[in-house]
């Protein structure tokens, strides 16, 4: 069984990066390399702590989620008020493509070098999204149209490449689709819930036989740490939306990729 220190470190990494446009999967893979924590057990652990991060977003957006499910207090009618169809349209492309290409992705795209490539390419796409932003047509998440939801969903497919970043792809895709930055970010967080539940559930069902009773403390620790850190990270990120957009995160990705590439070349890992 891995020690609790590894669970805490990976939980912090997951919580900090899951909803920031820097790629949590990429960070977990690279951190796993540094901690010598790889293999089937590590893959299952990463899926488990992602559920902790999902829970954090569900807590923050619980009123919106209840409204989407028709269980909350309805807001005044608007021309394109957000509903479940928007969410389905945004999630369906990546779910279908991810299921179809799952074996290819897991076999060829989870190496450290492909993750570094994803960090760079995702950062470039984020800069393109910010600098080539279409004229704003939707200033709030409730004004997002079905067509914009489809566009965002298609851009989300880019995140099937580990390191590209799901939030980075969807926020930049929202900007290119004419959605205001804060609205694109809120929509990105909302569609993360079904996307991550589906992906995590699939992986857990496939790899549940790798778990043993002795792993319980390790997995629970990572889950709790990821939940708490993600809760704080999302709240902080939402407060900083007006000050920082995608460019700083893109530059961070370039620096991280360069530093880790040097590390890989020097160590020969």
Image (cartoon, rainbow, N blue to C red):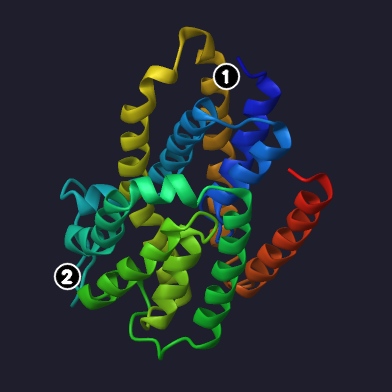
Residue 28 placement, left or right of 264:
left
User: Furthest residue to the right?
Assistant: 266
Q: Please name which of the two marks, 1 or 2, marks the residue nearer to the observer.
A: 1
Q: What residue is rendered at 81% in x and 45% in y?
A: 267
Residue 136: image location, x then y, percent: 39, 86
Residue 172 placement, left or right of 77:
right
Residue on which disc 2 sits: 77
Q: Are marks 1 and 2 in contact (CB under 8 Å)?
A: no
Q: Quadrant of residue 232?
A: top right
User: Furthest residue to the bottom?
Assistant: 135
Number of numbered discs visible in the structure rendering: 2
From mark 1 to mark 2, how far is it between C-alphas?
Answer: 47 Å
Query: Between 84 and 166, which is closer to the camera in this rendering?
Result: 166
Residue on which disc 1 sits: 218
Residue 128: image location, x then y, percent: 53, 82
Mark 1 nearby-residue class (10 Å; few <14, some 14–19, many ≥20) = some
Query: Between 207 and 54, which is closer to the camera in this rendering?
Result: 207
Classify 64 as above or below 36.
below
Q: What residue is rendered at 31% in x and 36% in y?
A: 202
Numbered badge on residue 146: none
Residue 200: image location, x then y, percent: 37, 38
What secondary structure is found at the residue carrying circle 1? helix
User: Furthest residue to the top?
Assistant: 213
Residue 107 placement, left or right of 190:
right
What secondary structure is found at the residue carrying circle 2? loop
Residue 172: image location, x then y, percent: 47, 74
* Quarter of the figure that contains the N terminus: top right
- Label located before the other in sequence (1 or 2): 2
* Quarter of the figure that contains the C terminus: top right
Query: Between 59 and 55, which is closer to the camera in this rendering?
Result: 55
Mark 2 nearby-residue class (10 Å; few <14, some 14–19, many ≥20) = few
Q: What residue is rendered at 45% in x and 69% in y?
A: 171
């Amino acid at each position: 069984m891995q020690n609790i220190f590894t669970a805490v470190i990976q939980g912090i990494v997951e919580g900090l990066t899951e909803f920031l446009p820097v790629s949590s999967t990429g960070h977990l893979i690279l951190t796993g390399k540094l901690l010598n924590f790889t293999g089937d057990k590590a893959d299952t652990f990463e899926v488990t702590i992602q559920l902790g991060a999902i829970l954090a977003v569900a807590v923050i957006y619980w009123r919106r989620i209840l409204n989407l499910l028709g269980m909350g207090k309805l807001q005044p009618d608007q021309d394109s008020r957000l509903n479940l169809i928007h969410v389905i349209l945004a999630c369906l492309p990546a779910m279908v493509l991810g299921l179809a290409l799952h074996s290819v992705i897991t076999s060829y795209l989870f190496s450290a070098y492909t993750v570094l490539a994803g960090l760079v390419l995702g950062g470039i796409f984020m800069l393109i999204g910010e600098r080539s932003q279409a004229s704003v047509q939707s200033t709030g998440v409730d004004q997002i149209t079905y067509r914009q939801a489809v566009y965002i969903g298609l851009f989300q497919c880019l995140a099937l490449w580990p390191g590209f970043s799901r939030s980075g792809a969807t926020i930049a895709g929202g900007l290119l689709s004419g959605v205001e930055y804060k609205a694109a970010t809120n929509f990105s967080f909302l569609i993360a819930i079904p996307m991550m539940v589906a992906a995590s559930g699939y992986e857990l069902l496939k790899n549940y036989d790798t778990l043993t009773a002795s792993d319980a403390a390790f997995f629970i620790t990572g889950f709790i740490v990821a939940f708490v850190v993600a809760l704080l990270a999302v709240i902080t990120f939402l407060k900083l939306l007006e000050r920082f957009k995608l460019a700083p995160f893109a530059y961070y990705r370039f620096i991280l990729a360069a530093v880790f590439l040097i590390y890989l070349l020097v160590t020969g890992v």
